């Protein structure tokens, strides 16, 4: 491991290493399978072009996050904007608010936060990971419970759909995004729960269903990978 460095993403060698370096064979296979499944779902049940764009960019984003690569934020921007319009059309106001006030700004904030905490490795630049303390877990749990109740009460005044599930996933996403920006490996435990709930929320939209199924599997791998990075001091 070398000392922290600024991202070399904007050099030709840096771009090559960022996007193509450090991939294990099974990672390439599963990424390819989920991208193919996403495109297939659209071809079989073409619900929305935005849904396909959101699904593909979202899968690329979370896989790159799991790898600790800062380029995840490029795909994250595409996902955030397309997902915002998907949620708007479906009247999932909690998810729409999450995209507008969390996903979109988080891409820019996260990029600059990560940029200051990257290290050079054989596989390229990887983010330094850390773990929550017991005190951190207590603060996180209390915040999620209180915020979920408050947001549910707000959503109950609208004509939104699935407000209980919508409200819970919204609050969990905010918490997970904060943990992600600050590079905590426990973000993945929240993403696992979020993805399970989101599969239920988008059960009638094939492109979103497949996307969140891919997210779920990636979250399991991301947690293991980030825990290993944290233990290694990365």
Image: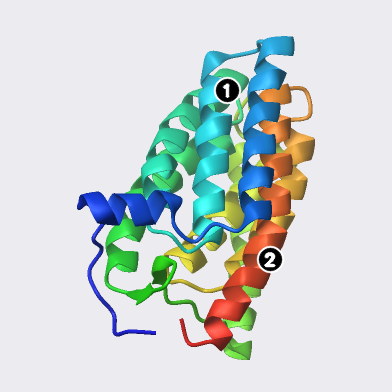
Numbered marks: total: 2
Residue 126 left/right relative to 65: left
- Categorize mark 1 by other alpha carbons within 10 Å: few (<14), some (14-19), many (20+): many
- Categorize mark 2 by other alpha carbons within 10 Å: few (<14), some (14-19), many (20+): some
* In the image, residue 157 above or below residue 66: above
Is residue 27 in view? yes
Residue 125 drawn at (x, y percent): 36, 67
* In the image, residue 37 above or below residue 185: above
Residue at (48, 87) in percent of width and height: 233
Residue 60 drawn at (x, y percent): 52, 42
What distance separates the C-alpha of mark 1 from that of mark 2?
A: 25 Å
Image quarter of residue 161 = top right
- Of marks 1 and 2, which one's residue comes earlier in the chain? 1
Reading the image, the residue beneath label 1 is 51
* In the image, residue 119 above or below residue 198: below
Residue 31 drawn at (x, y percent): 62, 43
Residue 105 left/right relative to 36: left
The numbered dot on residue 189 is 2
Is residue 149 in view? no
Residue 117 drawn at (x, y percent): 33, 74
Closest to the observer: 13 or 197? 13
Image quarter of residue 149 = bottom right
* In the image, residue 90 above or below residue 94: above
Residue at (58, 43) in percent of width and height: 154
Residue at (39, 84) in percent of width and height: 1
Disc 1 is placed on an element classified as: helix
Disc 2 is placed on an element classified as: helix
Image quarter of residue 92 = top right
């Amino acid at each position: 491991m070398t000392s922290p460095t600024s991202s070399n993403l904007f050099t030709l060698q840096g771009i090559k290493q960022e996007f193509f370096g450090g991939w294990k064979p099974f990672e390439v296979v599963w990424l390819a399978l989920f991208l193919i499944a996403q495109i297939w779902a659209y071809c079989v049940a073409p619900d929305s072009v935005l849904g396909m764009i959101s699904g593909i960019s979202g899968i690329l984003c979370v896989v790159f996050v799991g790898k600790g690569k800062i380029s995840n934020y490029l795909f994250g921007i595409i996902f955030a904007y397309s997902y915002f319009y998907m949620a708007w059309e479906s009247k999932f106001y909690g998810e729409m608010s999450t995209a507008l006030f969390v996903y979109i700004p988080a891409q820019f904030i996260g990029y600059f936060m990560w940029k200051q905490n990257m290290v050079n490795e054989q596989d390229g630049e990887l983010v330094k990971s850390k773990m929550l303390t017991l005190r951190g877990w207590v603060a996180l749990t209390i915040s999620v419970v209180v915020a979920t109740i408050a947001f549910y009460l707000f959503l109950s005044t609208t004509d939104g759909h699935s407000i209980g599930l919508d409200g819970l996933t919204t609050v969990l996403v905010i918490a997970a995004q904060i943990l992600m920006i600050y590079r905590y490996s426990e973000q993945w435990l929240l993403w696992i729960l979020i993805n399970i709930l989101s599969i239920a929320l988008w059960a009638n939209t094939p492109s979103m269903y497949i996307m969140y199924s891919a997210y779920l599997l990636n979250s399991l791998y991301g947690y293991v990978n980030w825990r290993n990075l944290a233990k290694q001091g990365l």
